[in-house]
Image (cartoon, rainbow, N blue to C red):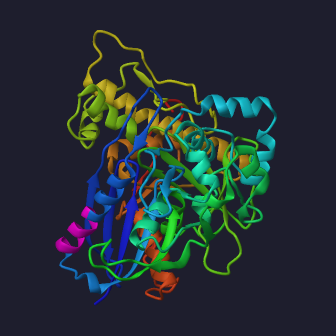
Amino acid sequence: MSFILSIDQGTTGTTVLIFGRDGRVRTRVCCEFTQHYPQPGWVEHDADEIVAVTVKAVAAALADAGVDAGDIHAVGISNQRETVVLWDRTTGAPVAPAIVWQDRRTADVCEELKRDGREDLVRQKTGLVLDPYFSATKLTWLLDHRDDLRGRAERGELAFGTVDAWLLQRFTGGAVHATDDTNASRTLLYNIHERRWDDELLALFNIPVGVLPTVVPSAHVFGETDPAMLCGIRAPIAGVAGDQQAALFGHGCHRAGLAKNTYGTGSFLLLNTGDEAIVSRERLLTTSACVFENAPPQYALEGAIFTTGAAVQWLRDGLGIIKDPAETEALAASAPNNGGVYFVPALAGLGAPHWDPHARGLLIGITRGTGRAEIARAVLESIAYRTRDLTLAMERESGVALTALRCDGGGSNNGFLMQFQADMLGVPVEVPSLSDVTALGAACLAGIASDFWSVDDAPFAGRLPMRKYEPAMPDVAR
C-alpha cells in the first residue's frame, strides 16, 4: 500500500495527516510550538522550532499509523501565509526570528506609503491592500533592522521565503528554493495578473530580487525529500499551497461562485471567482487560487479576520478562564444569553473589510453579574459577527446572495459557534465530517500531481458527509 503525507503547518502548531488511496485518514497528529511576543504588537516564531516540531509530528504520524517511510507516495504542504523567514543560502540557518503574519510592527510604514499615494499601484498589481499583515514590509524591516542583512542580501548570501519555501528548503536538503502562486500572491511583491515578481514593487519595498524563490503552480513536483531531513521519507513534494487556498481546493470549490470559511487562529472567507481577478471595491482581497501545471490562472476574493481561534487561546492563556478551547461550547451554552457583553476581537488590529491595524480589542457591557460563561459566549459570538461582516461585503461585491457557507478548521467543531453562525447569516452552515480540510487540500494537490488520484476520484470534502446547521433565530432577533 502507499499513502499521501499531508503537512499543515499552521500559526500555532503543525498537523500531519496520512491519507490512504481510498481517501480515509489513517492518523492525525498535532504538535504545538512556541509563540513569541517580544513587544506589544510583535509576533515571532523560531523557524528552526517550526521544522523540529514538524519532523516530530511526521515521525509520530508514521508510528501511529504503522506506515513505513518507504510507503509514502508523495508529500503535500499547506502553510501559514505571509510569515517571513530569512536564511543563509550556504548553511540553511535562519538569520533572524520569523516575523508572523499577525505582527503589526510595520503599521506606520504602511500608513506612510498610503499617504504617499502608493496603495492604488499595489492594489492593481497584487489585489491586496497596504497592511503589515503581508510579507513585503516585514522583509524590508528585517533587512533594515538587523546587522548587515541588507548587505548580505544584496550580495546574494540570503534567501527569503514564506513558511512553505522554508520547509521546502529544509526537507529537500537545501536543493529547492521555490514557492507556489498562492503564497507568492500574499507577499505584496507578486503581480497576480502577469504571475511574476514585479520589478516596480520590488523597488517600492527595496527588496533585492536575488532573495526571492522561484514561483510554480500549486500542483507541481517541487523536489524530492531528503530522507535524512524527514524521517527516512524519500518522496516527491508534489503539492504546496497557502492554508486558505488549500482549504478552498480541499472543499472542492474549484469553480466561480463557491465559497468556504476556515476557523483557525484567524478566519478566512474565500469565494472562487474563476479566471477573473476582481479588484474589490469593498476592500476585500483578490488572491491566487490553486492551479495545476500549464493550467490557466484561478482567482478568489478573500476576507481576512485576524483573531478568531486566537481569541479563544487568549481565554485560556491570557485570562485563564478555560483549560481547553473545547470547553467554550458548553460554557457559552450554559448562559441563557450574552448578558449584554460584547467582544471586539481586535487583538491584532482589524482585517477586512475595515483594515485598521491600530484597532485594539474591547470587552464591553460588563456588570457585577458577568461571569466566565458570558465572556466565553461573547468571544464566540464575535467570531460569527466578524464573519457576517465579510459575507455582507462579499454579497455586495459579487451581487450573489449567499445560500450556504461551507466551514472547516478547529472552530467548526464548536456546535454553539456553528449554530450561532447560521443564525447570524440566515443560511445553512455546512461542516464536512473531516475538519482538517486545509490538510486535505494539500493532500489532494500532491495526490493529483503525483498521479496517486485523478481529479475525479480525489477525496474532496464536498464528497464527504456533512453536518448541517440550519438558522433557527427569528429575523427580528437577528
* Residue placed most toward the observer, 16 or 211: 211
Residue furthest to the top: 368
In screen coordinates, is 283 left or right of 242? right
Q: Is residue 453 visible?
A: yes
Tell me what residue is drawn at x 39 percent, y 70 percent: 171
The percent coordinates of residue 46 (x first, y second) are 37, 47
Nearest the camera: 211 or 83? 211
Q: Which residues are magenta?
A: 56-64
Query: Is the residue 388 above or below the residue 476 in the image?
Result: below
For the point 53% across and 43% down, the residue is: 425
The answer to whether residue 385 is above or below residue 60 is: above
Residue 60 lies in the magenta stretch:
yes
User: Vertical placement of 361 versus 32: above or below?
Assistant: above
Residue 311: name its quadrant: top left
* Percent coordinates x, y for residue 326 in the rendering: 25, 44
Q: Is residue 263 magenta?
A: no
User: Residue 168 at what x, y percent from top left?
Assistant: 46, 68
Main secondary-structure element of the magenta-colored stretch? helix
Instruction: Please report the residue visible at 31 percent of the width from the left and 72 percent of the height from the top.
Output: 230
